[in-house]
């Protein structure tokens, strides 16, 4: 029997216990840095060095990070589902690659990836693990100085929305993990799921802004709540 299609949306809370900051917690990134100064194309045009420095520091932090038990549990769930012809869509707002490092076969990065650079000269995307700056040379076109982080900034369109919409509408269970439900379109996915008649679940450290929109909820650190949930799900196979 093919297991039901799952659509799982993840946010910064999934990677918090791997040492990567969240955005809106008390010690979150946006409590120390203004979005307008670091996460818009206008900020980048105004002061590229400042914006590159912000993302270089986050990329360096990511280079030293490891997947936690929640990443491993989601990768194992996706593997168990696909072994039986089922589908688990891992749609993440996160720009880290910890789900891939945990063994996830397919991850949809709707806000881009910290370990990729986007060349504004040739529009090419390339893997990038070191600091980005004015001397960086595009591996595809060879031009210097046109590279920015391949991260979706406020005011820009999230990536892969056609695929996301198609997978979300075809799902039979929607689960949001480690997200505050503050940023659209991701924050609206639970309403799309509800409108399609599927059950919805929030797994978070504490109730999000969207908590009331979910049919079931589980609260606690992701490294405890996510493995407990995936274990129960795999137990139904
Ligand atoms: N386990 C589970 N959940 C956690 C943990 C943890 N250890 N630590 C924090 N959380 C929860 C918080 O309670 C919060 O609800 O994770 C959520 C993090 O919320 P945000 O910091 O707002 O991050 P996120 O929802 O991913 O932000 C969405 O906003 O700034 C943009 O592009 C950025 O992708 C990001 C988007």
Image (cartoon, grey):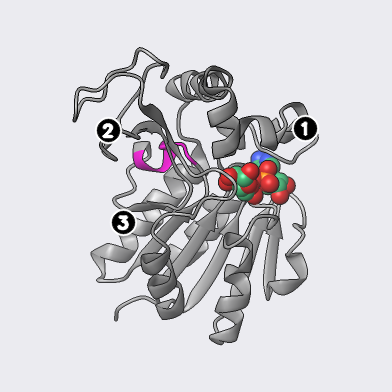
Which label is found at residue 126? 2
Q: Quadrant of the N terminus?
A: bottom left
Give how far apart the Cα atoms at labels 1 and 3 are.
37 Å
Name the residue that disc number 1 marks: 31
Tell me where the magenta segment starts and ends, as one range: 95-100
Residue at position x 29%, y 31% in the image:
127
Asked if the beta carbon under badge 3 is closer than 8 A to the nearest atom of ligand 1, the reply is: no
Specify which label sits upstream in the sequence, 2 or 3. Answer: 3
* Residue 229 occupies quadrant: bottom right
Q: Is 82 inside the magenta-drawn segment?
A: no
Name the residue that disc number 3 marks: 79
Specify which label sits upstream in the sequence, 1 or 3. Answer: 1
Residue 65, image x, y percentages:
48, 25
186 relative to 2, above or below: above
Residue 125, image x, y percentages:
29, 38
Q: Nearer the viewer, residue 159 or 234?
A: 159
Residue 7, image x, y percentages:
46, 67
SS at circle 2: strand
């Amino acid at each position: 029997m093919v297991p039901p299609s799952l659509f799982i949306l993840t946010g910064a809370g999934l990677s918090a216990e791997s040492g990567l900051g969240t955005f809106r917690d008390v010690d979150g990134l946006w409590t120390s840095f203004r979005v307008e100064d670091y996460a818009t194309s206008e900020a980048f045009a105004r002061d590229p060095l400042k914006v590159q420095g912000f993302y270089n520091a986050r990329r360096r932090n990511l280079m030293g990070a490891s997947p936690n038990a929640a990443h491993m549990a989601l990768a194992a769930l996706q593997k168990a589902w696909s072994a039986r012809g089922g589908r688990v869509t891992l749609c993440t707002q996160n720009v880290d690659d910890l789900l891939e490092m945990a063994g996830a076969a397919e991850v949809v990065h709707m806000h881009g990836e910290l370990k990729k650079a986007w060349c504004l000269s040739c529009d090419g995307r390339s893997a990038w693990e070191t600091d980005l700056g004015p001397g960086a040379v595009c591996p595809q076109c060879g031009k210097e100085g046109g590279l920015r982080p391949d991260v979706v900034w406020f005011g820009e369109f999230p990536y892969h929305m056609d695929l996301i919409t198609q997978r979300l509408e075809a799902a039979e269970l929607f689960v949001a993990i480690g997200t505050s439900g503050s940023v659209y379109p991701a924050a609206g996915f639970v309403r799309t799921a509800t409108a399609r008649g599927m059950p919805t679940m929030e797994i978070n450290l504490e109730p999000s802004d969207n908590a009331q929109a979910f049919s079931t909820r589980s609260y606690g650190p992701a490294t405890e709540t996510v493995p407990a949930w995936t274990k129960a799900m795999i137990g139904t196979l």
